[in-house]
Structures are given as C-alpha cells and as structure tokens.
Image (cartoon, grey):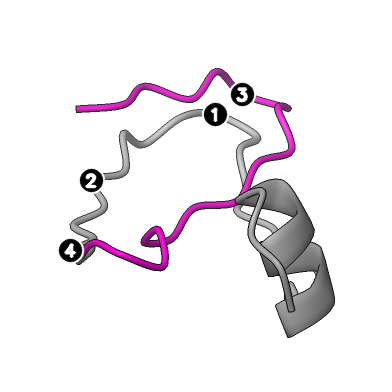
Amino acid sequence: MVNIAPGVKHWHGAAPDSWFSHLALEVPGEEASNEWLEPVDDEQYLKATDKEA
C-alpha cells in the first residue's frame, strides 16, 4: 500500500520484469481535485527503471 500526500507529483507502474495491479481509493475532501499529468514515454520509463533502450 502506498499513501501519496496531497500536492505530490508522482507516477506509478510496473517494472519491466514484474506485474502491476492498480486499485485507487480516494478520500473525499473539501476543495480537492485529481489532476492527471503527462504520460511517461518509453525513454523516460527506461531511464527511471535504470534499463537500456
């Protein structure tokens, strides 16, 4: 389980050699919103996972 604090930019996904399952639970809040950020392309992903292209 991962708890991301409000206002923290983050991304999530599987590692190249493992699976990933995502179940999101949202706690209602006052003046709160969800913002989907830019997609991560293959080059960014490989760099973040320390893998070669």
Of labels 4 and 2, the one closer to you: 4
Q: Residue 27 appears at what percent x and percent y?
A: 31, 34
**Pointer 3: what residue?**
6
**What span is in magenta?**
1-18
SS of the residue under disc 4: loop
Q: Is residue 42 above or below residue 13?
A: below
Q: Return the mark for residue 30.
A: 1
**Pointer 2: what residue?**
25
**Is residue 52 magenta-colored?**
no
Q: Amino acid at mark 2?
A: Leu
Q: Return the mark for residue 21.
A: 4
The residue shown at (60%, 51%) is: 49
The C terminus is located in which quarter? bottom right
SS of the residue under disc 3: loop
Q: Is residue 51 above or below residue 32?
A: below
Tell me which label, 1 or 4, sits earlier in the chain: 4
Q: Kindly indicate whether the residue at mark 2 contacts the one at mark 3 (C-beta within 8 angstroms).
A: no
Q: Amino acid at mark 1?
A: Glu
Left or right for 12, reference 39: left
Q: Is residue 46 above or below residue 42?
A: above
